[in-house]
Amino acid sequence: MEIKSKGVIIQVQVEKQPDKWLLDSAQEIAAAAEARGLILPAFSGGLALEGYKPEAQQLMVTKETPSLSAQEVITQNFKASMLGYRAVLGSLNSSRSRPERVALASKEEILSEFKHWYTAPKQAYAEEALAANPTLRFSLVMTPNRLVNSQELEKAAQDFGDGQPHPTTVFESLLEQYQAEQLSNTHPENNQAVSFSLIPNQLTNDMDGTVDEQCAKLEHLKSEHPFLKVPSLLDAVAYWQTLRAEGHRLTDDTAYARTYISHFDLPTVQLEGISYVPQSFVSIDGGAGIFPSSIKYGQIARIAIG
């Protein structure tokens, strides 16, 4: 590795340096990047050290660098989560009159709310899931804790599409059949600025089936872990924005598997005599969408910590 400064070039044989030197250098680089508002790909991505080689993971658990708790790793990527929150809130405020607009919460306010939200059972569940699956990671998603109607949700989804290769597709006739509480699944009555979710980068195992079967499986999971949920449609849009802020392109063959959500927990609605629930995803060509999904066919699912 070459280090250039004021015309002087220093050659450093990184592979021959001791573990402590590597870790200290990595931490200094990450801190300097954060100070400039940069998100380094190797340090982005929420809870898991996705893409690291096994020997790199071993370095993270040496005596000099004890393993980080899930909460500490989440807060390291707080910048991307904040960017996702701001993007969605900006979309919502742009379609509201000035008196109805929601003030942007400060980082300090959101961190305080997060510490109360991220309880010991949630942390234990997340850390157990990560230990069982080394390729799993979670994105911390901060959804504005406000109710949105179908027009506001559509506007937020379309604003995301402005930064993609293709515009967002939204079935208005589907969204119009749901109430704001169902589209949002937020609770503004609690006076919190943010509704938090930890959304996994992988689909949830053993959750496929018809809508009725999935609802039964979810209730079984919630009997032991009551904080589990299906991300709402508003959560989904915030998730797209957060992933993009984390550095994911969402324009390749991983986009669909990373973003697909069947919103099977919502009531079924009728379109031309057929029963549907919503589904949301970003396709492999980068086009996002909210579409109807027939309840007659088996579904896959993504379950989040909420």
Image: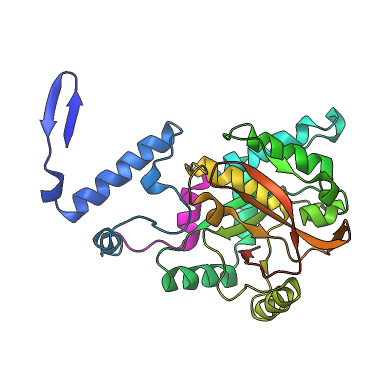
Task: Give the x, y percent position of residue 165.
Answer: 57, 34
Give the residues in magenta. 65-79
Colour treatment of the image: rainbow
Quadrant for residue 185, please give it.
bottom right
State the residue in front, 132 or 28.
Answer: 132
Q: Is residue 224 left or right of residue 50?
A: right
Q: Is residue 125 left or right of residue 263?
A: left
Q: Is residue 7 above or below residue 257?
A: above
Task: Give the x, y percent position of residue 119.
Answer: 60, 67
Residue 262 visible to an observer of this rendering: yes
Residue 216 falls inside the magenta stretch: no
Task: Give the x, y percent position of residue 15.
Answer: 14, 49
User: What's the magenta bit mostly, secondary-structure-wise?
Assistant: helix
Residue at the top extreme, as displayed:
7
Residue at left offset 80%, top offset 52%: 188
> The C terminus is located in which quarter?
bottom right
Residue at left offset 74%, top offset 71%: 211
Image label count: 0
Quadrant for residue 286, please give it.
top right
Residue 103 visible to an observer of this rendering: no
Q: Is residue 136 left or right of residue 221?
A: left
Task: Give the x, y percent position of residue 87.
Answer: 64, 37
State the residue in front, 64 or 169.
Answer: 169
Residue 73 falls inside the magenta stretch: yes
Residue at left offset 81%, top offset 32%: 95
> The N terminus is located in which quarter?
top left
